[in-house]
Image: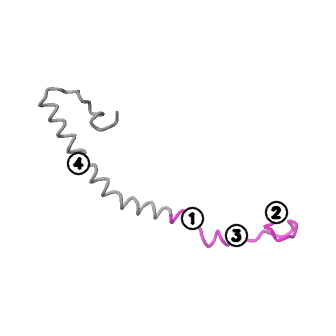
Amino acid sequence: MAGCSGCGCSGKCAAAPDLNAKLHPSDSTPWTILFVLTLITLLPAILMCMTPLVRLLVVFHFLRQALGTQTAPSNPTLMGWR
């Protein structure tokens, strides 16, 4: 059964073509559609979350200018990176 696809001929017959591969050429297509739809769904929410953050960073910049502290708190601290 070295080269046979399980028909019991001990490897003497030609292997049958894989019909499943011809009927379903790519299994990644549904995952691609799911990924794109998820991205389209979440993109407005991500943009809405980023807009107030930018506004807050501008306000904090002017507050630092008014207080005379140019580096305290630092920009990464305001962004939440540290």
According to the picture, the residue beneath numbered tag 4 turns out to be 52
| Label 4 secondary element | helix
Which is nearer the N-term, disc 1 or disc 3?
3
Q: Nearer the viewer, residue 35 or 68?
A: 68
Which is nearer the N-term, disc 3 or disc 2?
2
Query: Looking at the magenta stretch, what is its main secondary structure?
Result: loop
According to the picture, the residue beneath numbered tag 2 turns out to be 3
Query: Is residue 48 a member of the stretch shown in magenta?
Result: no
Question: Where does residue 62 sit, x and y in percent of width and height?
Answer: 14, 35
Q: Given this view, does label 2 or label 1 mark the residue nearer the observer?
A: 1
According to the picture, the residue beneath numbered tag 1 turns out to be 27
Q: Given this view, does label 1 or label 4 mark the residue nearer the observer?
A: 4
Alpha carbon distance from label 4 to label 2: 64 Å
Q: Given this view, does label 4 or label 2 mark the residue nearer the observer?
A: 4
Q: Residues within 10 Å of mark 2 (few under 14, many from 20)?
A: few
Query: Is residue 20 a member of the stretch shown in magenta?
Result: yes
Find the magenta span and give its range.
Answer: 1-30
